[in-house]
Amino acid sequence: MLLIKTAFKNIIGAGKLTWLNVTVISLTLVVMIAFTGIIDGYIEEARYETRSWETGAGQIWHPEYDRFDVFTLQDAHGIIPTKLKDCINSGSAVQILVTQATIYPQGRMQNVVLKGIPTSQKLLKLPTQELKSDLYGIPCIIGTRMAKSADLKIGDAVMLRWRDKNGVFDAREIVVAHIFDTKVPSVDAGQIWLDLETLYEMTGMHGEATFFVITENSPVNTDIEGWMFKDEKFLMIDIDLIEQSSRVESVIIFAILLSISLLAVFDTQILSIFRRQKEIGTYVALGMTPRKVTALFTIEGTTYSILAIMAAFIWGTPFLYWFSKVGMPMTDVYGDLGMAIGDALLPVYKLSSVLITVAAVIIFSALISYLPARKIANQNMVNALKGKIT
């Protein structure tokens, strides 16, 4: 306790140098917490939005289906298994039929993926109730990205061409009944949603589906009759990869920030030991062992981080609260790249992340203070009494 009191008095007595170090470390600490919050916020939001709009608690695929290969869509459909029909009737699963098609907006040709989904479904956030529109023609819903790429608005009609189950081409006019806004581009870009019954009539694939979206309490959550079950881990592997790369980037950024901020503490300790040679000799003469003197200087350096944490709490709390409401603005480029991201990234401050960041600052501050101070423990006692460090 005596060492702690002495160390605290010494760093307070250092005046402006102490508060300069505290300011730099507290700034680093707040930036680290904000950056970690951005990563945690994005991952949490991306998982929630993807689960709400696309994956549910899992999916069951036709064995020929590959969501990244449109050439598999012609054969990727089959009769719905009896157990899955029971799930559909109970509301624990939703069937979706997928096929390839082409639209001709303003005389242009654009390939699209045509998806049929029941209008009464409540499992996904897709506004399928809008497919009951009484507009002239076949009503469809599209996302904002699709509307932008095809230059379509609500009420616009566009010619659609597709192939039925026999490979015969057919064409009809569809009308945009609704344009929805989602952060998940994988249910938006290049896709047109129709009522499942309408798509059945168009393709002749009555009672068939390409994949099913299930809820957490679905009684079917394994492979069934050749259909393959895909869990959330598989469906969100891209989000997991983004999280892993983001964590690596954060470690690199944190290492740079900590190196810059703790360099000031290291220089301060070096200068302090050089200028306080007589004081160190006095401590030894009064009976303090060299190791205790080393501990004193280590505690002094660590106290910088303690004061920095207190300062960061005072000014950083309102800043981080404001930042959690405003977030980091993002451009449409990230959405076009297929990332589930909105107009802004809102940080989420997890207690575990904050505690790890604080602990890292304290530990590295103690380490960087000990390195120059350890020389005191190996010095010659006679020279210490003379106020000389060798």
Image (cartoon, rainbow, N blue to C red):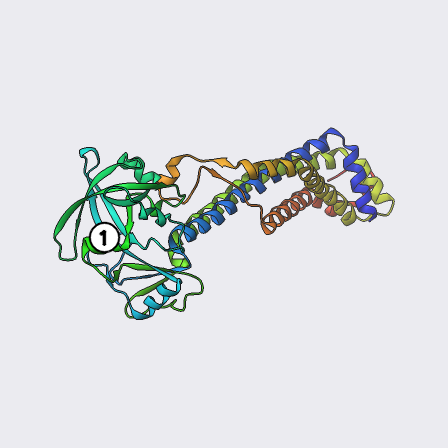
Q: Say what amino acid the circle numbered 1 marks.
A: Thr
Q: Residue furthest right?
A: 286
**Residue 77 vertical placement versus 339 (above, below):** below
Residue 361 placement: quadrant? top right
Left or right: 303 in relation to 97: right
Instruction: Locate the C terminus by quadrant.
Output: top right
The structure residue drawn at horizontal position 86% and vertical position 43%, both measured from the top left corner, is 285
**Residue 100 vertical placement versus 343 (above, below):** below
Left or right: 112 in relation to 268: left
Residue 10 placement: quadrant? top right
The structure residue drawn at horizontal position 25% and vertical position 49%, both measured from the top left corner, is 114
Please count the marks in the image: 1
The residue pinned by badge 1 equals 99
User: Residue 44 versus residue 250: which sits nearer the camera?
Assistant: 44
Left or right: 6 in relation to 205: right
Q: Mark 1, residues whose alpha carbon is within 10 Å: few (<14), some, or many (≥20)?
A: many
User: Residue 190 versus residue 374: which sits nearer the camera?
Assistant: 190
State the SS at label 1. strand
The structure residue drawn at horizontal position 39% and vertical position 41%, both measured from the top left corner, is 181
Q: Is residue 181 visible?
A: yes
Q: Is residue 387 visible?
A: no
